[in-house]
Amino acid sequence: MQEYSLQMRKEGKKIGFVPTMGYLHEGHLSLVRKAREASDVVVVSTFVNPTQFAPNEDFSKYPRDEQKDKMLLENEKVDAVFIPSPEEIYLRGFQTYVEVGEITRGLEGQSRPTHFKGVTTIVTILFNSVMPHVAVFGQKDAQQAVVIKRMVQDLRMNIEIIVHPIVREKDGLALSSRNIYLSEKERKDALVLSSSLRYASEMIASGEMDSGEIIGEMRKKIEAVDSSSLDYIKIVDAETFEEAPSLSQGGKYYILVACRIGKTRLIDNLLVNTGKSELFV
Ligand code: PAF
């Protein structure tokens, strides 16, 4: 991988990179297209990273389809696909981890305490392997994107991080490889995540600035769905990821929700800009 990237760099090509865990869907492909726009050659990695899953999580049953992934990436005319084995990534005797502080502790970090250490470690290894100029991450994992940006800044990694908007089904469900776990009924129930976010944005559009009120209404909607088990709803400053007890005019915030539908844990979010007439950004 490094030889390829060094050659591309020698030829003066700008390398765009999209790290994924495979089982690609239209959301991933939108990141690939964004990388294409921003660079000369596009590299995509698919690697289901064991260190970002806790022992009780879905690592072993995480969906995989390497042949289909390769076909989709070929259709997108990506220049290189990097599919390392776990042994190639985590060398014998591996003992070096990258850990980002405060902003990894709340939200996903609170529910999944070892998750971000695994993410920042693998992303660093992938960055060092692919040596990209630009990397594209999805807004679906909004906290992950902010954590990666922090790491890149703190460790002076010379890589531009682009965050690309969530791709949704027509009915609002955010695309996710984990949607495959949902039964037909759960698939319908899962719409409560996006519909409660939309409801929150309508409340804000009509002048509600109290986060507690907004979260309370979202909670009622989600708890009314029998298969749901709410993990968190938070409203945070979009840059710092600090909780915002109230919204101020002209601010940018993420409203984030994590919820189990049946056994499947789903996350979704909305980026709102209270200073704009068009609330969604
Ligand atoms: O967002 C993902 O799919 C993963 O967390 C990533 C960034 C590919 C690291 O394994």
Image (tube, helix red, strand yellow):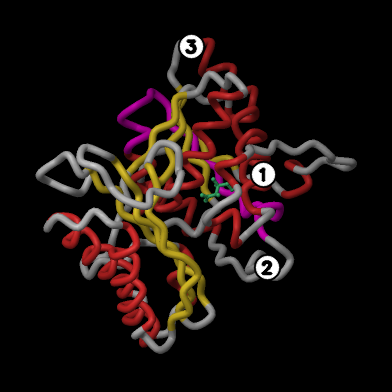
Quadrant (top left/top right/bottom left/bottom right) for the C terminus: top left
SS class, disc 2: loop
Mark 1 is surrounded, within 10 Å at the Cα level, by few (under 14), some (14 to 19) or many (20 or more) other residues, namely: some
Front residue (pair 9, 264):
264
Front residue (pair 110, 78):
110
Disc assigned to residue 60: 2
The residue positioned 47% from the left and 39% from the top of the image is 146
104 w.r.t. 50: above or below: above
Residue at the disc numbered 3: 11
Front residue (pair 223, 37):
223
Range of residues picked out in magenta: 34-53
Does the numbered disc 3 mark a residue whose Cβ is under 8 Å from ligand 1?
Answer: no
**C-alpha distance separating marks 1 and 2:** 17 Å
Residue 50 forms part of the magenta stretch:
yes
Residue at the disc numbered 1: 84
Q: Amino acid at mark 2?
A: Ser
Which of the 4 image quarters holds residue 174? Answer: bottom left
x, y percent for residue 19: 52, 42
SS class, disc 1: loop
x, y percent for residue 13: 44, 16
Q: Nearer the viewer, mark 3 or mark 2?
A: 2
Q: Amino acid at mark 1?
A: Pro
Labelled pair 1, 2 in contact (Cβ < 8 Å): no
Quadrant (top left/top right/bottom left/bottom right) for the N terminus: top right
247 w.r.t. 64: above or below: above
**C-alpha distance separating marks 3 and 2:** 40 Å
Q: Amino acid at mark 3?
A: Glu
